[in-house]
Amino acid sequence: MSPSGEEHGAPMSPSGHEPGAPTGRITVVGIGADGVDGLSARSRRELQRASVIFGSLRQLELLAEESLVAECRVWPSPLLPALPTMFDGLGDVHVLASGDPMLHGIGTTLTRLFGAQRVDVHPHISSVSLACSRMGWAVNDIEIISLVNAPARSARRFGGRAVVLSRNAGTPRELAQTLLDTGLGDSRLTVWEQLGGAGEHSFGGVARSWDHPLGDALNVIAVEYVPAEEVAILPLVAGLPESVFEHDGQITKHEIRAVTLAALGPRPASGSGTSVRDRAVSRLNGLAAEPAVAPRPLRSSRHGGPPSPPMRRNSASISMYSARPGRFRTGCRSGCDLRGWRCDPAGSAGGMLGAAADGGPDGCQRCYRGIRSVVAAMVLPPWGRVAQVSRRRCRPARGFTSWRSRLPVVQWSTEKS
């Protein structure tokens, strides 16, 4: 379990509760670094009446001086596979969690797995709230970023403040190096260890001169982002300039990428993506890839193979979050012509121009309900909404500036109910 209470590999799946499943109550009690002394009277009563208490070794040790009749059990490792049946036959069980169990914590995992009707949560003050109180920051003005199960690059921002939940004692050093490598070396980091406990301690500095030794594994990081003057701050919306990508010249132009994703209309309820012959995602919705597909060897190591180095570098360079082309779905359950295509953050001409050929979208409509598809193409199926997007750009002409027309692009979009 992480210092923030987040479980390594905690599932984000829908509730697995089924008729006939055990109906014993699961009570989750948040506890801080101050141990039992920081618990509310209600939380202490819950622990005193418990018969079985699950938690990490660190959390259970906080109860050592408390006179409890409960049997204390340490979480198994790995935790995730064991959770669905762990409480079978035990009746009511109690679970210790770090801080607020519903903030990247085990409370969220248990609620999704067993249903909110079976899980009671008694939160403690979160490490995020404690860090903000120490920094003098308003919680509603900062961003909360978890690096418990994410790479350090997912914590890059080009302005503002964030509280970063660490995976271990090495996270502050890793984050400082990542910020330095990406033009954010002037950002200031303040590490808070054992927040709220007797051993609370803090240290800080700027990313470029970070030389602190490894500290306590129980820590969070308050970050004030300061980009270098020469760093190009990318917009949050789609339609990034071609110059920020590594490409071979055949790249879907930024105007087309922008209008394509606008027509796709990513929605929060659908996660962060829909479909542009694969999975397209919005920079506003948590991932930062531009939508397109890459069947060519330059963009994919082999047809249907893993993303090529240029694709990976594009994803890493434009992502403020953890967009990884390798995680994008490849293929289609019906065996249609989507099979083997990859989503390329750069937006390849081969993917967005001509993507409707061979009946690919039609096959995808056969096997996926609720899918929304937008294709920029030359040949289109006889259904859906069709629009033509024309563009002109200014170019020098004999000492003046004149308009030059670009080839029009046909946009096809549909949503299957």
Image (cartoon, rainbow, N blue to C red):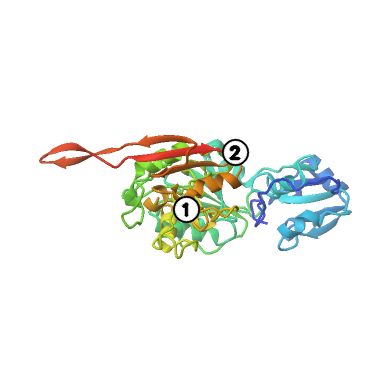
**Where, by quadrant of the figure, is residue 133 drawn?**
top right
Is residue 160 among what the camera can see? no
Is residue 382 among what the camera can see? yes
At label 2, counting other C-alpha atoms closer than 10 Å, the crowd grade (few under 14, some 14-19, many 20 or more) is few
- Nearer-the-camera pick, 344 or 132: 344
Q: What whole-number distance in Å separates the C-alpha atoms at marks 1 and 2?
A: 21 Å
* Residue 343 badge: 1
Task: Judge left or right: residue 309 versus residue 130.
Answer: left
Picture coordinates of residue 316 (x, y %)? 44, 56
Instruction: State the count of labels.
Output: 2
Q: Mark 1 near mark 2, Cβ–Cβ under 8 Å?
A: no
Picture coordinates of residue 10 (x, y %)? 67, 53
Compared to 382, does 291 lie above or below? below
* Residue 72 badge: none
Q: Check disc 1 and give the amino acid type.
A: Cys
Q: Quadrant of the C terminus?
A: top right
* Residue 269 badge: 2
